[in-house]
Every structure is written in structure tokens, then in C-alpha cells.
Image (cartoon, rainbow, N blue to C red):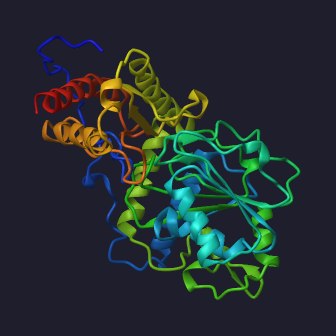
Amino acid sequence: MAQNAANAKPVLRPASPNFSSGPCKKRPGWSADALETTVLGRSHRSKLGKQRMEEVIDRSRAILNLPDDYLLGVVPASDTGAVEMALWSMLGARGVDMLAWESFGATWVTDVIKQLKLEDVRTLEADYGTLPDLNTVDFDRDVVFTWNGTTAGVRVPNGDWIADDRKGLTICDATSAIFAMELPWDKLDVVTYSWQKVLGGEGGHGVIILSPRAVARLESHVPAWPMPKVFRMTKGGKLIDGIFRGETINTPSMLVVEDAIDALKWAEDIGGLEGLLKRTRANRAHLDAWLATSDWAADLAENPETASNTSMCIKIVDPWALSLPDDQQATLPKRISQILEAEDIAMDINGYRDAPPGLRIWGGATVEPDDVKALLPWLDWAYLSVKAEIQTG
């Protein structure tokens, strides 16, 4: 890293200090004044309310290039609610392989084993920074996985490992991947996400995407447990198709819906999916160039092909730091984050609480690549500042 003996502060500052991995930075130029408010105070079941919900669905489908026979609906409780809805509604028809290599994947494992109490469950786990052996997944079974490990910065590299002739369903939590990574729709039967990640939208609502195979499962499988109302996608053995036409299960925030429409319009203006992908790739490229010359930081992902371009996680590898007691090693990224927040350079970049000590920088499409580039010298400055603090006692 290029630092002088006095460890002078960098001159260039990010235009925005918001690098949180969720809720994430609003789109460039965002203002509440941009939101349409006519629908506020109206019923979401009114003609206008339903039109606004349908607009979110239609714009989302178009940007994602969703196949015509796939369904997209807005559901309660963010991505968590969407994942739980899929697990509670569809699992139990056959055995299931659960993949986990970070905290959210581990949460879905816990829910399936301890809450649904399924008996035929295989858990394929890996430590932070690595993936399970994808070649051991059995696609005669249902498969549940995260496309991108939000708290580990590790993603599956592609969909080639997913069988075309699978008998089970693939259920994919894609909340920190969708709109930032290319998803092979023919390989995925259920996909969930929330607006608060790559689109920079507000929280509280989730999205669930269903393939025809997923719909067939819903209409043929009756779960062995009571189904809460907010998880029900069928009635009388038939799909409640209104969910996918803007008729939500419970009352949505129409202000959040308007914010989602604003984000989707911005995505269209920058070139749709390809424009979104271009920005996230640029953010990742800046980080990679910096890591290549750093003598204290490295990517948490051990294989570059699996390194995330959204939740970009770095670990500290300076031999001096690794020689410290564990509690002091854990203090390093926390202190770096505190210093950068105090300087109004970077907010919320300390690693996730369950992850190994490190930093997590959001690189989704709403973050300007120039801001990532400007941030990196500040990481060097903050690290050397913390190192000096500890060495001088």
C-alpha cells in the first residue's frame, strides 16, 4: 500500500459514505421528492393501488428477463419471509439437501431441522470463505441454497452444477445476488429476494419467483404442519394467482412500493440488467486491483471465481495482526469501521457479527464505482492508524 511514514490522510473522499450491506445505499440522485404519493392513504386493493403493485411486478419481470411461464409476486416480511414461505409450503414431498456456508444458509438449515422437523435432511456445509462440494448435491432431492452468501462474500460461480433433469426443486435465496449477478432461470425453481439490496429499496417486503415446477409442487403437495396465513399460496389445491397480479397476502406499505418503482425506473434508465451488472462488476474490479497490492488485506473468499461482487468481504492477513490475541484481532475491523465512520468516509462496513473478523463493503449497483475506488486508500490509512494505536499502547 502506498503510504508515507506519517500515514497522511488521503485527499479524495467518496461522494457517499454509504456502503452498508442492507439496507443498502439508495440509487444515485435519490430524493423522497421523486416518489409519487397519490396512492398514499388509498387502499392497496383499490384500482390505483393494484395498478402500482402490478407495475412493480411488470417492471421487475422485464428487467430480470424472466421467462413468460415464471411467476413473480410480492410477499410479506422481506427476503426472510419469502424464503420461509417457500420452505413451509413446498418441503416435505421428498428428501432435501441444505447448503450452508454462511449465517443465512445456516438459518435455513436450523428452520428445516428444528422447526419443520423434517427427517430426510442432508446438510452440506462449508466454513466462511469456501463452498460445499457442489458435485455431491443430489438433485433427486429438493435443494435449498443461497446464490450469494451475504455475510461471507462467497457465491456459487454459475448454475452449471445444477442438473437439468432434476426431480427435486431448487430453492434459491438470491437476495444479495439478483440484479447484480446472472441467474440461469432454467436451473432455478424458486427464487427469493428483497428490494433493500441491489435496488437500494426499503425493507419489509419480499419477492418470490416460481417456475412451473414450483407451481406444480404447490398444487400437489399438502404440508404435514399447520400453515400460517402469510405463508399460504394455495386455496383448495389451486395456486392463489392473485398474489402474482398485485393482490398481496397482507397490507403492503404503498410508500415502499413507490420507492421500489423509483428504483426500477432508475435501473431501466441505466440500461436494465446489463447496466446494473456493469456497475457491480466495476465495483468488484476496483477492490480486486487494490487487494492485489495490499500487504494486510485479502478476500475472505478463497477462490476468486466465488468472490462476491455485492457483499465484498475482506479479512486481515498481516502477520503482525494474526499474532495478536483473538480478542484484539476482532477489535481491528471494528476500530477501522469506527474511525471511517467518524471521518464520514464509510458507514456500516464492519463484518457481520457471526462472520470471521473483517470488513464488508457493499458493491451493489446503487454504489458508484468511483466511491469504491476513493474508499480504498482510506482503508489503508485507517488500518495503519489502528495498528499504530495498538503498538503504542
Front-most of residues 270 and 344: 344
Is residue 302 shown to the viewer in this render?
A: yes
Front-most of residues 143 and 202: 143
Quadrant of residue 210 within the rendered picture: bottom right
Q: Position of residue 374 (x, y in %)?
A: 28, 24
Q: Position of residue 209 (x, y in %)?
A: 64, 60
Q: Position of residue 7 (x, y in %)?
A: 15, 18
In the depicted structure, whether residue 158 falls above or below residue 74:
above
Q: Is residue 319 left or right of residue 171?
A: left
In the rendered image, the quadrant that contains the N terminus is top left
Residue at point 13%, 18% (across, down): 8
| Residue at the right extreme, as displayed | 165
Q: Is residue 278 left or right of residue 368?
A: right
In the rendered image, the quadrant that contains the C terminus is top left
In the depicted structure, whether residue 25 falls above or below residue 340:
below
Exactly how many numbered labels are in the figure?
0
Front-most of residues 54 and 152: 152
Is residue 178 shown to the viewer in this render?
A: no
Residue at point 72%, 71% (across, down): 91
In the depicted structure, whether residue 372 falls above or below residue 20:
above
Q: Is residue 138 left or right of residue 340?
A: right
Residue at point 50%, 36% (across, down): 276
Q: Is residue 210 left or right of residue 374?
A: right
Front-most of residues 369 and 74: 369
Q: Position of residue 27 (x, y in %)?
A: 36, 43
